[in-house]
Amino acid sequence: MKKRLGMVIDQERCIGCEACTVACKIENHGIEGWIRVETQNVLRKDTPQGRFPDLRMNFLPQLCNHCQNPPCVDACPVEAFTKRKDGPVILEDEKCDGCRICLEACPYDAIIFNQEKEKAEKCNLCAHRIDQGLEPFCVVCCEGQAILIGNLNDPASRISQLVSKQATFQRNPEKETNPSVYYRPPKQPRDL
Amino acid sequence: MSGIEEIRKIRTVCPAHCGIDACGILAHVKGDRVVKVAPADFPNPRYRRICLRGLSTLEVTYHPDRLKYPMKRVGERGAGNFERISWDEALDTIAEKFQAIAAKYDWPAVAWVLGGPGAGTTKFGAYLRLASLTQSTRVSAWGYGDSALPCGSRVLFGSQFPYAFLFGSLFSSPSAPEILVVWGANPGESQPLNLMRPIMDAKEKGALLVVIDPRFTVTASKADVYLGVKPGTDTALALGLMNVIFRENLQGEAFIQKHTVGPYLVRTDTGEFLRAKDIGLQDGMDYIIWDIVSESPRSRSTANVKPATSGTYTVNGLECKTSLQLLMELAAEYPPARTAEITGVSPDIVTKLALRIGSAKSVNFVTHMGFTRTYHGDISLRALGTVATITGNVRATFGGGHLPAVLNWKPFLHTDPKKPSYSRLGILQLYDAVISGKPYPVRAVWFSFINFLNQCADSSKIVNKMFPELEFIVSTDLFMTPTARYADILLPVCSYLEFSDLIPFPYPYIQLQEKVMAPLYESKSDVDIAAGLANRLGLSEYFYGGEDGFIDLILDSKDPSLEGITRQKLKQGPMPLKFLPKMDEVMDIPFSTPSGKIEIYSEKLREVGQALPVFLKPLETPLKPEEKKYPLAFIQGHSRFRTHSMYANVASLLKFNPEPVVEINPQDAQERNIADEDTVTVFNDRARTILKARITEGVRPGVVNISEGWWIDQFKEGSVNHLTHAVINPVQEKIYEPNMHMNDVAVEVIKYQEVES
């Protein structure tokens, strides 16, 4: 079976530090980091939900989902997006004419408009690195070791094991895009 | 090779966080410019790490605001007006000034005020060497908030650090503890940063994670159980836990017998340990136990005795209790209901946690300095350690987790055996030395790798009383910090990519911080600056060889942990320290306390009523807010966006976190009619600090938090340390060194407009 590169992001291990965001900007020179960390269910980052001391705070790093059925590829009128055979959805910025149709098409808000260049940009799964056998830079720099990359079509890979054996979820499954980024939700806290 | 286009990769170290977390850095160099930093590999991949600050390295090195050349002050101190001068003029001026001050007041009147030693070995050593050779004053960094932890650890364990005893096995053991209690520390965002991975690994393997903190931190967000304790009441919480543990008879008798002073008899008339001489036994000063077999007192070294751990006994007409008995009686005063009233933690949780700790196979206590930055923080550490001790959760054997000390300063000192070494002052003692000449006058200070004014207690006292008394101030810095503005001579220093150093972290590795690029502008390394001054003081022979010479000086110091480690070998990558105990090696650690045991009872401190870890009220933190003029407890958490005041001027990090805010609970905000984002005044008798309010459930009601490290100029008015006090705890001064109590401060918060109208 052909390769399907994907990710598992472990919310249990994500400490919301945003090193991934900083790392992405350094590696890819985007207008901002293409992976962003949301604090879930609250309006303001880094604040918990609930009432003191019964509180929860979980982080959800978000990036391009490298969907199996990527709406951006179909939507782009100039064919700047391609779905690679091994999984990554690539946006070639030299082809982008800045029409912003893809921003509307993506259900995950994963495409960012670079005002300076007047072009769309997004995570390419660090294709330039994975082609050299390196991990994406956010994976390398993740403080919590919460971001894993691997081949979802290889049942022996660590991320396939996680997806098959543990409860994981994809964002907005109802959109039927079949994301290649899976999330492992945080564990329920145990009582004393 | 094309040269220009080729990227060279050089391994170095980011030493930013007082050292102990120091990450390996792979600098990518193109021509003479560093174009990228990445985390460098370690033999154990768990150690390959970097954080968002380390990733921002190049924004510091190439920051447009870098100080570029030596300068002298023109105009008022603090106004920030400087004029460019040459290095020769700068160093000549400093040498002349220091010599003139020394001629008038003697050399201890010149003080070297240095930041954390872990932040670099040679740069710290260079100034220690100058202090040692001139017999001037070294101002210790411990009192910046870090000395209460060693104060407590010295009393209880006889060691500077309690870490190996309390959580050493997190590094060494393949299995996880049953319970992991993170108490008064936030490794998810602050030191010890390198513990967050082991903590999460342990939780994954099944450890129950308990976090105790007045703030719901990132670390707390990972907890199974969160205890939002009131600041300054940790000792009461520990006594409450002990209350239940003793009540249910869950203490570890065998451990207490073997490793603690628990069975030793204490005279109730004097509070001293009963000694052999008191009851006419031989062995004069030996400690006495009550043998339950013969029902008689025996010296502890007697063979075949069974010491009683608890009880009251009359020996030669003297009433005695075992020291554990005294601890039990103290703990008996803290049943869960009373503990809850003091600490704000529910009685049910106190009881359940105590039962779990008391019955668990193994518990690790991860702690650091946050909760010890209170007036009695040394006792808080002892109380926590005592909970670990009575339940047998102290690693009293080498098990691979003992952290050997490798910061060996001796090679830098006593360079002339005829001369004594430097004088030493704690940071709070420096205030008095400058302001009132006690214990001796200090008239000139040299600040290096320290943003003194920004980070030390009671800023107004520093600006209005301390600085005006100083005849001469030198500062070496990368930027025009709030402290640098007050310098008479300001010297530009290198960022870590521009000089070499030896970094004995992270445990168990030692790393070479290799110079990656030439110093920018006219900046110099601290070692070169110290050498330049040494030349002018006739001490050049002691500063031969620059940073590399000093690195070799340490590596050749015959320290057993450094055996076989050379600078050349370190260029290939980090090396583990030698002399590490093997995993399976079990041997008792002789505690360096007076008794050689863990001192749950400290005879020395009986005179000040602190022989036991007694709960004493905080200095300012209001336990009963309604009775207080300033009803809110003010604390200073640490932010992931800064390392103290470093990185506060990094643009990409300011995008995430643009300005200081005071975090306040909705309940307290509502009472004060404060809305989110309102500009508010945080004040007490010392000062007012003006900034935006952030309303969040993340702080306990009755507590407000402003994260430390923001520069004074980033506030509308005041700063965190305008609110703090520089009060010395004399007990800490006696044990080791007085600490700053930045988490023991009372304030009130009101809307800014109300003040103005």
Image: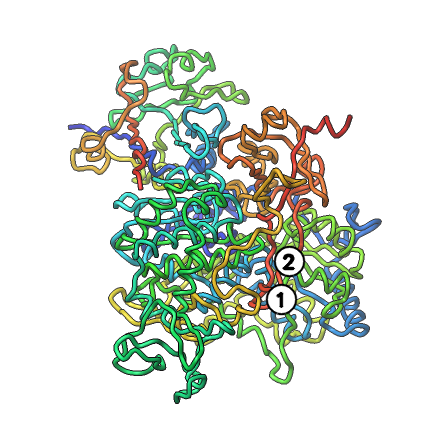
Q: Residue at x 64, y 73 (%)?
A: B422
> Which quadrant of the figure has residue B631?
top right
Residue A71 horizontal/vertical position (percent):
33, 14
Q: Do the dots labelled 1 and 2 sit on one chain? A: yes
Q: Position of residue B16 (x, y in %)?
A: 52, 51
The quarter holding residue B682 reads top right
Task: Report the residue marked by disc 2.
Answer: B448
At mark 2, the secondary structure is: strand
Residue, x 65% and y 34% (percent of image)? Answer: B749
Q: Which residue is mark 1?
A: B127
Q: Is residue B539 above or below residue B155?
A: below
Residue, x 74% and y 69% (percent of image)? B109
Label 2 marks a residue whose chain is B
Kind of residue at badge 2: Ser
Q: Residue furthest front?
A: B317
In x, y percent, where is residue B38? Answer: 43, 45
Q: Is residue B357 left or right of residue A25?
A: left
**Real-space CA distance between mark 1 and mark 2, rounded to the nearest whole angstrom:** 9 Å
The percent coordinates of residue B279 (x first, y second) are 42, 84
